Amino acid sequence: MSEAAQNAVSATNVHKLADAVREMKSNAADREDVVVDMREAAHSRLEILAQELHPVFAEVPDDDPMFDFAISSGQQPRLWIDAVAHVTMGPDRRTYRFLRDTRLGRVVLAESTETGPVAEQVTRYIAERMVERQRIIEGEIISLPRGTERRNEAPARKKPSIWKALLGTVLLVLAGGIVGVASVFLFLSDRFPELQQYLQP
């Protein structure tokens, strides 16, 4: 093959590769546009749900640290309720999914194409968490007895000291030894009559 023919083939290959790269960039841009459009659509739907829940959010005390109530703008937008629960759009981008992360994995609390059922479940979830927090706070209150109550209480039973326990053990061993020696003398007195003079008063 001549040098001119090789140069023509090389120019043709470069031209085709440049076209292929240009086509790939165009396709990637189109896909990105679709992804951006889907993300913006999901964000808009979550804003609609947040507007419906706005009266509920407004009733939660400002000093309650459990709840977030914010829409995150990431790859997949989420309406956060607290640190473990959020609403996101399903794969069809039309279904609202209320999810909660647990130790055993993610749980679907509600799923619907309408905002009403999901908003109702979110409201019930917020109420449940507020009740749990109130119970925890009330459970931490411990009433301590006052001075007069302490004086009226019966004195606590003292533990026996180690010396008393040791003395009781020694006396028990000595009593057992005396009984044992007396038993031996009684047993041997039948065989050895001369021992009976020691046993008689």
Image (spheres, rainbow, N blue to C red):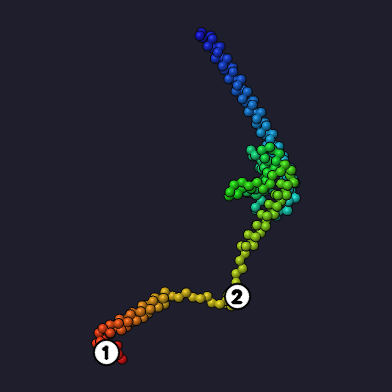
Q: Is residue 194 above or below residue 88?
A: below
The residue that appears at 56% across and 77% down in the rendered structure is: 154
Q: Is residue 70 left or right of residue 191?
A: right
**Element at label 1:** helix
> Is residue 144 at least partly visible in the picture?
yes
**74 over 184 or under it: above or below:** above
Question: Which mark is drawn over residue 197?
Answer: 1
What whole-number distance in Å separates the C-alpha atoms at marks 1 and 2?
68 Å
Q: Nearer the viewer, residue 55 or 199?
A: 199
Amino acid under disc 2: Glu
Q: Quadrant of residue 51?
A: top right
Disc 1 versus disc 2: nearer the observer: 1
- Residue 179: x percent and y percent? 34, 81
Left or right, residue 151 beside residue 96 = left
Q: Position of residue 174 (x, y in %)?
A: 35, 79
Quarter of the image where one finds residue 63: bottom right
Image: 151 above or below 36: below
Please say whether residue 63 is visible from this viewpoint.
no
- Mark 2 is surrounded, within 10 Å at the Cα level, by few (under 14), some (14 to 19) or many (20 or more) other residues, namely few
Secondary structure beneath dot 2 equals: helix
In the picture of the structure, the residue carrying the numbered disc 2 is 149
Tell me the amino acid under the disc marked 1. Answer: Gln
